[in-house]
Amino acid sequence: MARRKKVYEGKAKILYEGPEPGTLVQYFKDDATAFNAEKRATVEGKGVLNNRLSEFFMTGLNAVGVPTHFIRRLNMREQLIRAVEIIPLEVVVRNVAAGSISKRLGIEEGTPLPRPIVEFYYKDDALGDPMVSEEHIIAFGWASQQDMDDMISLALRVNDFLSGLMLGVGIKLVDFKIEIGRIWDNDYMRLIIADEISPDSCRLWDMETGQKLDKDVFRRDLGNLADAYTEVARRLGVMPQRETGVTKPTLIN
C-alpha cells in the first residue's frame, strides 16, 4: 500500500491518511520507550508483534460488542482504523497493585485489589501524564459526566474480556491502559476504544512464576523484551515465533 500523508507520529506508532474519508492507517514502530522516553531502544519485530496482538484483542472486543476503531489489518505492520476524536485521557484499570499505585499508596506490588480500580490520567508527555480526578475532567471540559460513565463502563468491559482471555493461557492481567475516542454517526456521538491494546499497554504476569511478560521487562532490565512479547503471542496462538523476526533490543543513547 502506498504511503500517504503522515497525520501524527507518537512514540510507538505513526498515523497516515487512510484510503477513504474517515479512515487512517496505523503503523507500528519497533521503538520501545519508558519513563517519558528517557529510556529508549529499538527492538526489531516489536511493531509486528504489537500489530498482530492489537488486531487480535480489538477483533475480539468487536465480536463481543465492545466497539473499537479497528477495521482490518493491512500487512505485518499496518492496520486500517476509523479516525476518531481522541479524548485527552488515558483510562487505567487495575486488578493487582503494581507500578505507580504501589508507590503512591504504599501497597506491596502483587497485592490483589478488592475490586478493579479505574483511574484517569491527562495525556501530556511534558507533564508526565498526571493522574486527574473526575472533577478536573469536568472542570476543564475534557469529557462530560456521561462520557466518564461510558468510559468507565467500556473500560470494565475490556477488563472482563482481557482477564478471561489471559486466564485461559496462564497469564494474570495486572493492569492496562486504553484510550477512547468519539465518533459521529450522523448526529449521534458514541465512544469507542482507540489506539492499541498490546503488552506495551498492559501489565501481564505468568500466573505460576510471576514472570513479567510486558514492557516492565524493558523498564526494569529484566531480560529480552521481544522474547516476552513473543511468549504472549505464542500462548494466545496469534502468530508462530518464526513470523516475528524479533531480535535483541538495541539501546539508543
Image: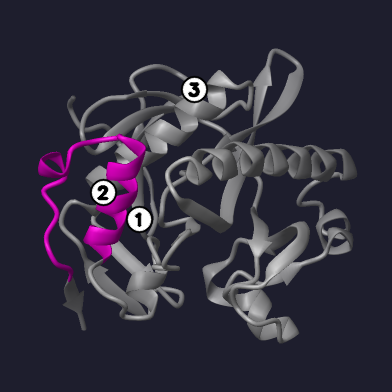
Q: Residue at x 76, y 18 (%)?
A: 188
In the shown orientation, is residue 151 left or right of residue 57? Answer: right
Question: Magenta segment, principal secondary structure?
Answer: helix
**Residue range corresponding to the magenta coloring:** 225-249
- Of marks 1 and 2, which one's residue comes earlier in the chain? 1
CB within 8 Å, label 1 to label 2: yes
Mark in the foreground, 1 or 2: 2
Secondary structure category for the residue under label 2: helix
**How far apart are the two marked residues, 3 and 1, measured between alpha carbons?**
22 Å
Q: Element type at marker 3?
A: loop
Q: CA distance from mark 1 to mark 2?
A: 8 Å
Answer with left or right where residue 237 lies relative to residue 120. Answer: left
Which residue has dot 3 on it?
22
Spot occupied by residue 233 in the image (x, y as percentages of width and height) = 31, 44
Instruction: Residue 92 in the image: state x and y as whole percent.
Output: 65, 57
The residue pinned by badge 1 equals: 12
Q: Quadrant of residue 157?
A: top right
Q: Is residue 64 above or below residue 131?
A: above
The image's mark for residue 47 is 2
Query: Mark 3: which amino acid?
Result: Gly
* Identity of the residue drawn at 58% across and 54% down: 177
Q: Is residue 158 left or right of residue 7?
A: right
